[in-house]
Amino acid sequence: MILECVDILVPAGKEAKFERAIELALSSALSKSPGYLGHKVQKGIESPQRYLLWVYWNTLEDHTQGFRGSPLFAQWRAIVGPFFAQPPQVEHFSLVLES
C-alpha cells in the first residue's frame, strides 16, 4: 500500500467552499480510480487555510500513471484546482511501522 500526501493551501475565506469542492471531487473522481483504497482530509488548526489530503493507493503506479493519466484526474483538477493558492506539494510514502 502507498500513501500519497498532498499539502494544500487555499486562500483565506475560501475554506468552506473548498471543503465542499474536495468532498465532491473525492466522491465523483478520485474514489472511482482503479487502485484507490481510501482517503483522509485534515485541516490545520494553527493554519486553517492548510489541508492535508492522504490518499491510500494499492501501488504507486495506480496514482502516478493510472489516476494522473486518466480523465478522472482532469475532472478532479477542474473541481478543486480553482481553490489552490499555490501548487500542492505531493509526496508518496510506504509503511515502515504501524501500531
Image (cartoon, rainbow, N blue to C red):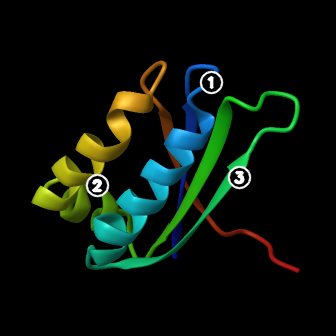
Q: CA distance from mark 2 to mark 3?
A: 22 Å
Q: Which amino acid lies under the numbered mark 3 shown in the image of this protein? A: Gln
Q: Amino acid at mark 1?
A: Gly
Q: CA distance from mark 3 to mark 1?
A: 17 Å
* Front one among 35 and 25: 25
Q: Residue sitting at 31 percent across and 46 percent down?
A: 79
Instruction: Tell me which residue sits at (78%, 38%) in the image.
Output: 44
Say above or below: 60 vs 86: below
Q: Which residue is mark 3?
A: 42
Number of labels in the image equals 3
| Left or right: 41 as drawn, with respect to 43 | left
Question: In this figure, which residue is indicated by the disc labeled 1?
Answer: 13
Label 3 SS: strand
Query: Which class describes the residues within 10 Å of circle 2: few (<14), some (14-19), or many (20+)?
Result: few
Measured in 3D between alpha carbons, the distance from the residue under mark 2 to the one under mark 1, in whole angstroms, is 31 Å
Residue at 79%, 27% in the rendered image = 47
Disc sitting over residue 21 in the figure: none
- Judge the density around disc 3: few (<14), some (14-19), many (≥20) Cα neighbours within 10 Å: few
Mark closest to the chain's N terminus, 2 or 1: 1
Dot in front, 3 or 1: 1
Q: Amino acid at mark 2?
A: Thr
Rendering quarter of residue 45 = top right
Mark 1 secondary-structure assignment: loop
**Location of mark 2 (residue):** 64
